Amino acid sequence: MNLTNTNPPSAKYLKDYTKPAFSIYDIYLEFDLKATQTQVHATSKVKRNFSDNKPILGALVLDGIDLDLLSINIDGQAFDDFQLLNEQLIINIDRDEFELCIVTEISPATNSSLEGLYLSGGAYCTQCEAEGFRKITYYQDRPDVLATFTVKITADKKYPYLLSNGNKIEQGELEDGRHYTVWQDPFKKPAYLFALVAGDFDVLKDSYKTMSGREVELALFVDKGNLNKASHALTSLKKSMKWDEDTFGLEYDLDIYMIVAVDFFNMGAMENKGLNVFNSKCVLANQATATDSDYHMIESIIGHEYFHNWTGNRVTCRDWFQLSLKEGLTVFRDQEFSSDLGSRAINRIAAVKAMRTHQFAEDAGPMAHPIRPEQVIEMNNFYTVTVYNKGAEVIRMMHTLLGKENFRKGMDLYFERHDGQAVTCDDFVNAMMQASSIDLTQFKHWYSQSGTPKLVVKEKFDKTSGVYQLEINQVHTATADQDKKHNLHIPFSIELLDQDGKVLQLTYEGNVICKVLNVTQGKQVFSFDNIKTKPTPILLEDFSAPCQLDFNYSDEQLCHIVRHASSDFSRWDAQQMLLIKNIKAAVKNDNIDLPKNITELISDILLDNTIDLELAAQLIKLPSYDVIAAEYEEVPINSIIEAIDSFEQQIAQTLNTVLFDVYNKLNENSVNECENLSTEVVGKRALKNACLHYLAKQNEICMVEALNAQLEMINMTDSLAALSSAVHANHELSQSMLIAFESKWEKDALVMDKWFGLQAMQDKPDIVAHLQSLYSHSHFDYANPNRVRALIGSFTHFNIKQFHNENGSGYKLLTDLLIKLNDINPQNASRMITPLMSWQKYNVKRQKLIKQQLERLADIEDLSSDLYEKVSKALN
Ligand code: TRP
Ligand code: ZN
């Protein structure tokens, strides 16, 4: 291993935060856009900072990477008292206030990192979060430096739209076929919120009248020819604007809100002030090309970026360790938005699934970190499910502890105190604490402690006294980053069901007890009286805290909850526990038969005329491989896959008639409902396709017609469900269906991603060779993260059996790709490495194979800081 030989990238620590000696408070940026020689003139007003009324001594430290420095001027004079380091420019100056003008040159056309200024397709665009602005010019690239930006963009007229943040204040023509536009953003912002876009687009325009009566212009810029996929995003934007006014009293603050869709993008989207940039896959949709879940995803991401305008932009982060200040809070807000507009239970189910599979795994692996990390090598590595999703759960717990009204008061106080500032997570919790008078001192440990707490619960019922007791223990195990753990303040929500499934009033000695128990100690006992027969407890209801639950439920208790709980989430949660329990038993005993009570339960759900159809679809699906794998220290990969497959076969067989009847009934009107996106029809499609997934496994003749008919549907949900059911069942039709789908969609890159995904999920022994051949497919492009994730991400995450093939070919395929991506796009490489990180969870043979590949990575020259951080942690 070579990791320590060559000048390894070093870590930064939260505890080392200091205010800079200077701050840039105003910048005038001029871009002369040319593919390989873009000149950037940056004229900054700089002022010395004070701490305790004393000037902070020191130089002006500017960040910069891959820049060609052409000149430096201070107050109009050429300046040469500076040091040019690898990634910094140090200006030695003893003035307290001055104007700094720096000219640099950059090459957008050769920038494949998708960070800084780059070309995406035919358009120039930028991505500055977290530390990409330093690839544009030398600057204080840190979120606690807030400046007003004025931006002049000059470009060839083949780029008709020249966009940046704020309001357009000037535009004009130049002699040489070029033109320019000047933008001014009246709000001070950190550099990571800067954006520039130049290109030729189709534009969908609309407007929104805010609650105080201001007209806001809305504009969505898409690639030429894509207007027929733009309306859903714009509708979602208007819904978001209204929701934030209604829910938090927050109004949009500029006269224009622009969204640009680009094909080359590392993440989902970016909240740049007044000029969001989106991955085209998170914007573009029509019913022929996007599934119902794509529609839902787009609505939530549009909401997410819009909500950042207040939680992120108006109030931003002091430093990047505080990332969850804006991300956890904004995810919480987008989850609430989706829940208010659609089904709360279905949204909660999705959020909890993400936590239990991805976040719990991250906490258990070598990259474990608290939602406010203390130590970072590459900031891009910390846009994680922990910071985002667990961060949102931490906000949700405060919402639960304070109640809706106090939470709103806390938000109001937060904005009143901190609008226009760069603040910390502590500032947020303090606002919540003071607005509600609820003590959150112990609660704050959630910000500094990593790991998933385990709640071990025991029950005791005394029939004669009618007293029921729950003993709750919190167990914290050491994580890769942290040995010492505190007991946490955990809101533990419960319900007790009687034998008829009715919810019991919680009382003890004459007092009513709130269903949210405050667990604060290592071991606590809660008592309830007036109970006649032994109740069935619903524990950690609604996933009231991001913890694992350890309670010895019987199958009967779980069935009772599934059948009777009033909360749809609780029904699903109990169903999951029941299935997990039985799949684990099958893994242990080599495929025991699926118990009859489970098939009966599924049958009853299918025949229930009153149930929400989307919920029914969730209830009849077996838990995914990830969910089961999370239960083991050493994951018995193949046994889990076999057990799930065997259960699916048994359900398909035993319930064949019911499944087929329900399928046919729900499918009756589908041709006329292709364009219908109502909750009701979305539910119908969800349940119908959940049935189809089982039916395809039967490989019966009658399914051939159904699969082919559905594939032809002008509705992507139905069409893709047919194809995916066939592929997952290894149905004899799957090859011909894949070919038909390709020839139908070969012109649509986003739809072809779905095809790449299914290609990669095929369970066949020559899959690695097949994937390699797809690298030469005309649509594939190593430089486009969507393509790479569609093909190889689908393989490593969803083709578990073949990826973990003990011949090692899956691990090698991924590593070959990572080596390539390390040069092209380190950020994407670093996100793709996840499946190799948890090598300790596999058998010795696989451990050896994975470690070999990690060593290969460690040995490559010019290993990026992104991969270095992960590889070194994985091997440690
Ligand atoms: N702030 C963005 C969001 O959550 C995340 C993001 C977009 C991002 N692009 C990025 C983070 C590039 C790091 C690098 O909405
Ligand atoms: Zn965000």
Image (cartoon, rainbow, N blue to C red):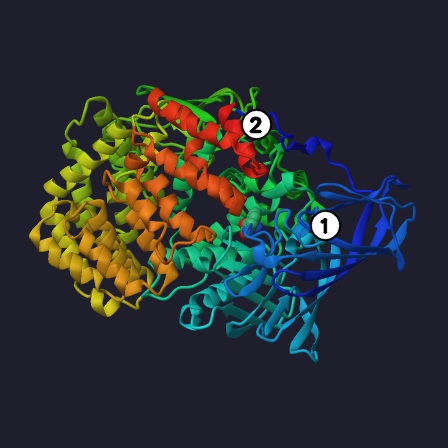
Establish if 459 lies above or below 354: above
The residue tagged 2 is 3
Q: Residue 741, located in which quarter of the rendered image? A: bottom left
In the foreground, 31 or 329: 31
The kind of residue on which mark 1 rests is Gln
Question: Is the shortest distance between ligand 1 and the CB of mark 2 under 8 Å?
Answer: no
Q: Quadrant of residue 628?
A: top left
Residue at image x 26%, y 27%? Answer: 584
Could you tell me which residue is drawn at 29 percent across and 58 percent down?
Answer: 717
Disc ID at residue 451: none
Find residue 730 and report its horizontal and vertical position in percent: 18, 45
Q: Badge 2: few (under 14), some or many (20 or more) residues near its Cα, within 10 Å?
A: some
Front residue (pair 137, 628): 137
**Looking at the picture, how far across and down is residue 814, in whole percent?**
40, 38
> Marks 2 and 1, Cα distance to the nearest angstrom?
40 Å
Res. 421 mark:
1
User: Dot 2 lies on which element?
Assistant: loop
Q: Is residue 194 left or right of residue 494?
A: right
Residue 396 placement, left or right of 751 = right
- For mark 1, give the secondary structure: loop
